[in-house]
Image (cartoon, helix red, strand yellow):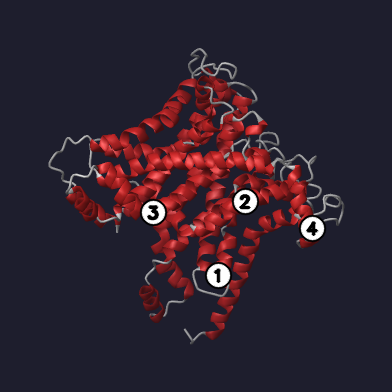
């Protein structure tokens, strides 16, 4: 639809007076604003990663070349943080895509109580993150948390959900998946509504069973939406700060120290802004690599 | 399809079982939030002291306990930050979105790429430079600082929503108005904006609650607890069990209700709004 409107609009816009200033007047303020609060700070952060700036003097510091990078790489902190971020992001994206598509498929056919079911399934997205984290941290509580009560009831052993280095990353991933799956579900649900029912019926008349229709008609039709929302979830997970910061603070023994949390801790608890900026720069590079890679994959599939 | 009645029934059972599991997983944390808010703080930490069912007879205690946590002060601060962010990002977003939809100009590709780029920048990445900037401008401990920081991320989202809404408004309507030399800006405010009101409302909800929920900037820039929004105030109770937990959960419930109500109202628009930003153009 937007393709055709765009064509229509651009035909109209062949303006005789081509050097019009009007567009720039409209765009000036928004771009100036974004430059001031986003792009200029972004540039500064890259510069700070090469300086020995400290929190007490956030606008000072001397250039030290790659010293911050070298120091962080030498004690493995940075590389383990990159690895934890990749693991956290990959697990979140894959699990939320699978659960979101299953949820959307289950909701796609009308049934009694569908609106209620869909609304409840949106809670993870609608509830403010900090409120959700508050209740999850209580549910994870070693002694009185409901998850361990349920585990007891089912005859399983209690877990140290957030305080064991082996389990903590999976626990924070679980919360993140709970938060982002509704978004996947909404996007896929919207795409499912545009699957032409004639095609599905034709396939059924030709003898295809439910799973075959799903595989050969439905999934190909919703694949672009899945790619798109997968990209969104990837970027959001790399950016997401408060789930890990508030549940584990990056611990225990740095087992959940994702890049954005490492940045905040290094800056405001170790007071070293230069080293903190290194975490940020690596995080940005990671986000750009992942976004570019998925764009490339998409192009390769279209060929 | 009636040829395979038994397989159809199996499929129905599987579907309902699956739905039940998904609804329980999605809804349980919220149920537990309500459940804890209504629990008796005396028995909460004792063995078998927790009720599995909502103790609705404790509603009066629930309302009383809200006063043990400064939730209404927090909500006032949250509202200020969220409303300021919404107004600022919508004003700038309408200008940018309209320009991206209606004009062809040199540098348009760069402008929309820049807007798109903002969506992959982690907030944490600009935290330190913004902190430095706010120290110089005296915006530490100021709710206005939060408005300024949040609007940077919200502006492009608003712009993308406005752009795709304006794309679907027939250009003839504007041409008719411009025949008598009405300035472009007046056309935008008097003719286009009223036509895209539903999208503006959706953009307002999305930007309002993004700022309502925001934690990282608020926790870093607001050092004085009197300025805290609810996100920072509630977070200060995580893992800290001195304050009765039911009171804290009660505050979380009050903080969550507006967000849930508005998101459920505009859920369809959220999809088109958020995905609009991800499709370049």
The chain ID associated with circle 1 is: A
Report the residue marked by disc 4: B58
Q: Decide if residue A86 is in sight here.
A: no
Sort mark 4 into few (<14), some (14-19) or many (20+) by Cα contacts within 10 Å.
few
The chain ID associated with circle 4 is: B
Q: CA distance from mark 2 to mark 1?
A: 23 Å
* Image x and y of residue A235, in percent: 48, 43
Are the numbered discs 3 and 4 placed on the same chain, yes or no?
yes
Q: CA distance from mark 3 to mark 2?
A: 26 Å
Report the residue marked by disc 1: A114
Q: Secondary structure at mark 3?
A: helix
Q: Secondary structure at mark 2?
A: helix
Query: Badges 3 and 4: C-beta atoms under 8 Å apart?
Result: no
Q: Earlier in the sequence, mark 3 or mark 4?
A: 4
The chain ID associated with circle 3 is: B
Report the residue marked by disc 3: B197
Q: Is residue B84 above or below residue B5?
A: above
């Amino acid at each position: 639809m937007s393709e055709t409107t765009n064509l229509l609009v651009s035909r109209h816009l062949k303006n005789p007076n081509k050097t019009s200033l009007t567009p720039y007047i409209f765009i000036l303020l928004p771009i100036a604003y974004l430059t001031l609060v986003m792009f200029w700070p972004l540039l500064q952060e890259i510069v700070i990663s090469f300086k020995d700036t400290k929190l007490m003097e956030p606008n000072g510091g001397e250039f030290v070349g790659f010293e911050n990078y070298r120091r962080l790489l030498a004690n493995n902190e940075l590389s383990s943080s990159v690895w934890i971020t990749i693991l956290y992001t990959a697990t979140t994206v894959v699990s939320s895509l699978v659960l979101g598509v299953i949820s959307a498929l289950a909701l796609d056919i009308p049934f009694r109580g569908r609106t209620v079911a869909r609304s409840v399934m949106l809670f993870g997205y609608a509830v403010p993150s900090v409120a959700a984290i508050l209740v999850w941290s209580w549910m994870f509580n070693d002694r009185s948390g409901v998850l361990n009560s349920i585990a007891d009831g089912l005859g399983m052993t209690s877990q140290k959900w957030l305080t064991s280095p082996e389990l903590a990353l999976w626990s924070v991933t679980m919360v993140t998946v709970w938060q982002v799956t509704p978004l996947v579900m909404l996007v896929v649900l919207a795409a499912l509504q545009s699957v032409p029912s004639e095609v599905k019926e034709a396939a059924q008349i030709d003898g295809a069973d439910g799973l075959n229709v799903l595989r050969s008609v439905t999934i190909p039709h919703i694949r672009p939406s899945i790619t798109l929302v997968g990209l969104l979830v990837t970027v959001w997970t790399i950016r997401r700060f408060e789930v890990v910061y508030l549940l584990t603070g990056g611990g225990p023994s740095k087992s959940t120290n994702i890049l954005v949390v490492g940045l905040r801790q290094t800056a405001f608890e170790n007071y070293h802004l230069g080293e903190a900026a290194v975490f940020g720069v690596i995080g940005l590079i990671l986000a750009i690599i992942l976004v570019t890679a998925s764009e490339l994959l998409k192009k390769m599939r279209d060929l | 399809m009636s040829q395979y009645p038994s397989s159809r029934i199996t499929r129905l059972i599987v579907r309902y079982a699956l739905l039940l599991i998904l609804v329980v997983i999605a809804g349980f944390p919220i149920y537990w939030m309500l459940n804890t808010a209504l629990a008796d703080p005396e028995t909460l930490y004792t063995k078998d002291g927790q009720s599995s069912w909502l103790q609705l007879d404790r509603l009066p205690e629930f309302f009383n306990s809200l006063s043990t946590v400064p939730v209404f002060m927090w909500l006032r601060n949250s509202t200020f930050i969220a409303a300021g962010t919404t107004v600022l990002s919508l004003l700038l977003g309408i200008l940018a979105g309209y320009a991206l939809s209606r004009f062809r100009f040199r540098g348009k590709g760069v402008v929309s790429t820049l807007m798109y780029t903002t969506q992959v920048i982690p907030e944490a990445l600009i935290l330190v430079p913004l902190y430095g900037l706010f120290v110089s401008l005296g915006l530490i401990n100021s709710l206005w600082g939060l408005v300024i920081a949040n609007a940077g991320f919200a502006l492009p989202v608003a712009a993308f929503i406005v752009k795709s809404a304006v794309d679907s408004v027939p250009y003839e309507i504007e041409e008719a108005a411009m025949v008598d030399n009405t300035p472009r800006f007046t056309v935008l405010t008097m003719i286009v904006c009223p036509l895209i009101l539903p999208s503006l409302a959706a953009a307002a909800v999305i930007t309002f609650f993004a700022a309502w929920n925001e934690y990282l900037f608020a926790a870093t820039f607001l050092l004085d607890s009197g300025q805290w929004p609810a996100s920072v105030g509630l977070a200060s109770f995580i893992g800290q069990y001195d304050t009765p937990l039911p009171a804290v959960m009660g505050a979380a419930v009050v903080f969550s209700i507006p967000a849930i109500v508005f998101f459920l109202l505009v859920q369809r628009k959220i999809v088109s709004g958020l995905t609009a930003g991800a499709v370049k153009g």
